[in-house]
Image (cartoon, rainbow, N blue to C red):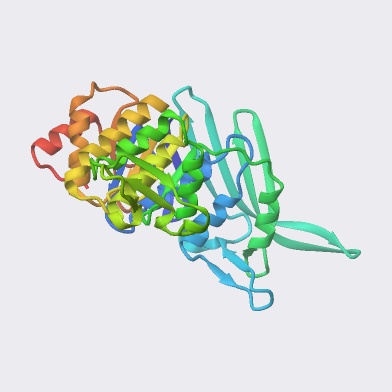
Amino acid sequence: MLKSLKIENFRCFPFFEMQQLGRLNLIVGTNNSGKTSILEALQLLLNTPFSFDFEILEQITTGRSEYVISDEDQDRNLVVRHLFYNHHIDIDSKFTISGKSFGDNQAELIVSIKNIKTHTDLVDQESLFLCVKRLISSMEVETPFKLSSAGMLSLKILRSATNNLNHSKSNIQFVNSSSLTAEKALDLFEDIVLTSEEELVIQALQIIEPQIKRIAPLIGKNGYKGTRGSFIVQTPENQRIPIGSMGDGMWRILGLALAIVNAKNGVLLVDEIDTGLHFTVMSDMWKMLWETAKRLNVQIFATTHSNDCWQSLADIANAENPSEDGITIHRIEKDKSKSIVFTERQIAIAAERNIEVR
């Protein structure tokens, strides 16, 4: 579990650090202050213990539409300069993301632009490469990706490296502001069918609709492939209702529950966690996440703009005994190199006195 994070030259941050990280960390701040970029930095740093999963680069850049389509072969080319501070790259440009755990173990990711000499057809030439270096304890691995003359990374090149990896189930789960796709939700549900975690998912749905008895995937000829109708729930009248018929909040809660139970001994990252949720269910949502995080050893990082969201978290913080792996709020301010940290006691006082923390 991380206790600190440091970011250099990534996205909007020339230098930024977060200290006093807890088990549950809510990140607040104005628009364009870098909240989502912090989640992306964590995803890049933590996604695989010893071999970097290059698919994460694709997810982060395409999720922000940071790519162009090649006229020649219709391949996507990732515009990697947007990952670097000021959206600019040159030879020797680099960004660094590092973190320290409670056991003082350190992990570091260095992504740099290098000019490397290559030998093809009896001709030596220099080309730009995006080099991804991963350092954990005494281990160091670097992988270079050739860039185009315009400094873009072909998705075909990136995917060829991804396909050569031995993929293992990831315990780093990212839920973005638009929630999980139906395909992702089905994959995560498959991993918890007929386990104790399946019951937890049902309990999470009951936060919004207490009468739900069961949930099941609907696939095959009766399924709604690629849509929220891929799941149905059962009511006391034994009706089978597509979960998509029950609103955005139900889909959001389902995504949060599926993600956290699949993040056992790992990390859950959630962008705009309050999306689709009415303020009356937020306290129960936080209670579900907090109790599950403690039981399954999950560290949570989430962002919000909502006053109701952080104040409902204060109810949970007020009931907890202060601890180094407890609940924190981190406020991000533009042009500041550190987050402003609110501990459990400070969160409770701020809510009681109606002090603004966002």
| Residue projecting furthest to the front | 237
Number of marks present in the image shown = 0
Which quadrant of the rendered structure holds the N terminus? top left
Eyeballing the image, is 357 above or below 289? below
Residue 152, by quadrant, is bottom right
* Residue 333 shows in this picture: yes
In the image, residue 201 lies at what x, y percent?
36, 38
Of the pair 207 and 170, the residue shown nearer to us: 207
**Residue at left 85%, top 59%?**
119
Q: Is residue 51 left or right of residue 42?
A: right
Residue 24 in picture, x, y percent from top left: 33, 34
Left or right of 24? Residue 168 is right
In the displayed structure, 48 sits above or below 227; it is above
Q: Residue at x 23, y 37 (%)?
A: 284
- Residue visible at 45% across and 30% down? 195
Residue 140 x/y as whole percent = 66, 36
> Does residue 51 sit above or below 88 in this rendering?
above
Q: Residue furthest left?
A: 353
In the picture as drawn, the residue positioned furthest to the right comes out as: 122
Tell me if I can see residue 332 in this picture: no
Q: Position of residue 90 (x, y in %)?
A: 60, 61
Q: Is residue 352 left or right of residue 23?
A: left
Quadrant location of residue 325?
Answer: top left
> Which is more toward the observer, 225 or 175?
225
User: Foreground: 168 or 32?
Assistant: 168
